[in-house]
Amino acid sequence: MIFGSRAKAVVATLQQPLWRLLAINLASGIAVAILLVGGLLALNPAHLRDLIVTDIHGVATIALLLFGFVITLGSTAMGTAIMAIGRSVDRARADR
């Protein structure tokens, strides 16, 4: 029952437009971060993949790299969405 009430609270929170906007943009930031880390590992710039694979803590290195990109790109996407709200309000006022 505890999880049911928590799930209802999460659903209720995500039904509010601001939280939904932030969640969508956070998800897009996470997707870009995953693509960026995957691209870095695939392209192997400056032998980065070789360095990570040969290290004893390679998984932790990839996890920290991904975490850093998620924080950076997720917050950038969310901040851009928040800043764009004011722009859309200004355009709506100009159209009147």
Image (cartoon, rainbow, N blue to C red):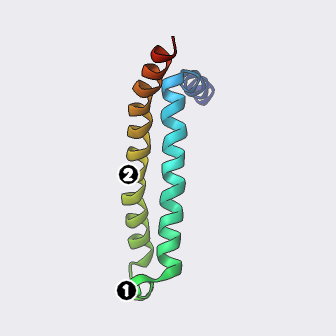
- The amino acid type of the residue labelled 2 equals Ile
Regarding residue 48, the answer to whether it shows in the image is no
Q: Tell us which disc is closer to us: 2 or 1.
A: 1
Above or below for 30 versus 65: above
The image quadrant of residue 55 is: bottom left
| Total numbered labels | 2
For the residues labelled 2 and 1, the Cα–Cα distance comes to 24 Å
Residue occupying the point 41% across, 89% down: 54
Residue 62, percent from left and from top: 43, 71
Seen in the picture, residue 20 relative to 48 is either above or below; the reply is: above
Quadrant (top left, top right, bottom left, bottom right) of the N terminus: top right
Quarter-of-image position of residue 51: bottom left
- Asked if residue 37 shows in the view, the reply is yes
Disc number placed over residue 24 in the picture, else none: none
Reply above or below: 81 against 6. below
Name the residue rendered at 59%, 30% in the picture: 3
The image position of residue 71, as x and y in percent, is 38, 51
Compared with residue 80, is residue 90 higher up or lower down, i.e. above or below?
above
Residue drawn at point x = 43 percent, y = 88 percent: 50
**Residue pushed farthest front?**
95
Q: Residue at x 54, y 64 (%)?
A: 35
User: What residue type is disc 1 on?
Assistant: Ala
Query: Label 1 neighbourhood size at 10 Å, few (<14), some (14-19), many (20+)?
Result: few
* Residue that badge 2 annotates: 71
Residue with the most extreme top position: 96
The residue closer to the viewer here, 7 or 46, is 46
Earlier sequence position, callout 2 versus callout 1: 1
Q: Residues within 10 Å of mark 2 (few under 14, many from 20)?
A: some
The image quarter containing residue 89 is top left
Name the disc covering residue 46, or none: 1
Residue 95 is situated, as x and y percent measured from the top left of the image, at 51, 16
Element on which disc 2 rests: helix
